[in-house]
Amino acid sequence: MEWKEKIRRWCAKGERSELETREKLKRLGASSNEIEVELKFLENEGFISESRYVSAFVHDHFRLKNWGPIKLFHALRKKGCSAHLIESELSKISENEIEEALQTVINARLTLYPEEHKIQRERLIRYLQNRGYTLDNILSALRRL
C-alpha cells in the first residue's frame, strides 16, 4: 500500500493535527515537497482540519478525562495548534462546567486517599494543578469540602 493511501486511511480514522500528520508522513517516507502537497490535499478534502481537531481534543479531554483548561492549552500547543484556536475553543467552556469537572476529579481522588485534603493538602493541590486547574478554582473547591 502506498503512503498516500495509508495517510488518508489514518486521517479518516480520527481527528489529526497538522503536526501529527506531518510527522506521520515523514515516517512513511514522503519528501518535504510531497508532504506540503499532501497536507494541502488532506485539508482541501476535509481529512484534516485544525479547528475540528482542537474542538474534538477539548471535548474528549475535558468531558471524558476531566482535564483542566491549563493542561488542555499546553497539550494542544505541544501538538502544534495555534493559541488563538485553542483559546477560542476553551472560552466555550463555562466556569460552572470547570467547577463541576474539578469537583469530579476531587471526589475521585478522595475515594483513593480519603484523608488527603486534611493531612496532605499541598499534595492534593499539586495533583489538581497538574490536572490543569487554576489555584483559585482549587482553593475555592477545597473550601467547600
Image (spheres, rainbow, N blue to C red):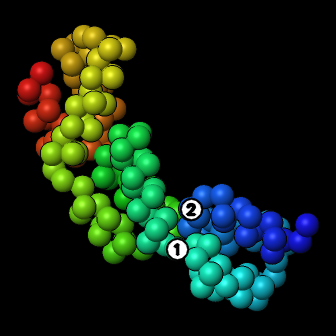
Q: Which mark is residue 49?
A: 1
Q: Amino acid at mark 2?
A: Glu
Q: Residues within 10 Å of mark 1 (few under 14, many from 20)?
A: some
- In this rendering, the answer to whether 110 lies above or below 81 is above
Residue 5 shown left or right of residue 118 in the figure: right
Residue 68 shown left or right of residue 97 in the figure: right
Q: Which residue is mark 2?
A: 15
Most foreground residue, 131 or 121: 131
| Residue drawn at the location 32% of the way across and 65% of the way down | 89
- In this rendering, the answer to whether 25 lies above or below 75 is below
Q: Position of residue 73 (x, y in %)?
A: 37, 59
Q: Position of residue 81 (x, y in %)?
A: 46, 70
Q: Position of residue 3 (x, y in %)?
A: 84, 71
Q: Which mark is residue 114?
A: none
Q: Is residue 5 visible?
A: yes
Count the marks.
2
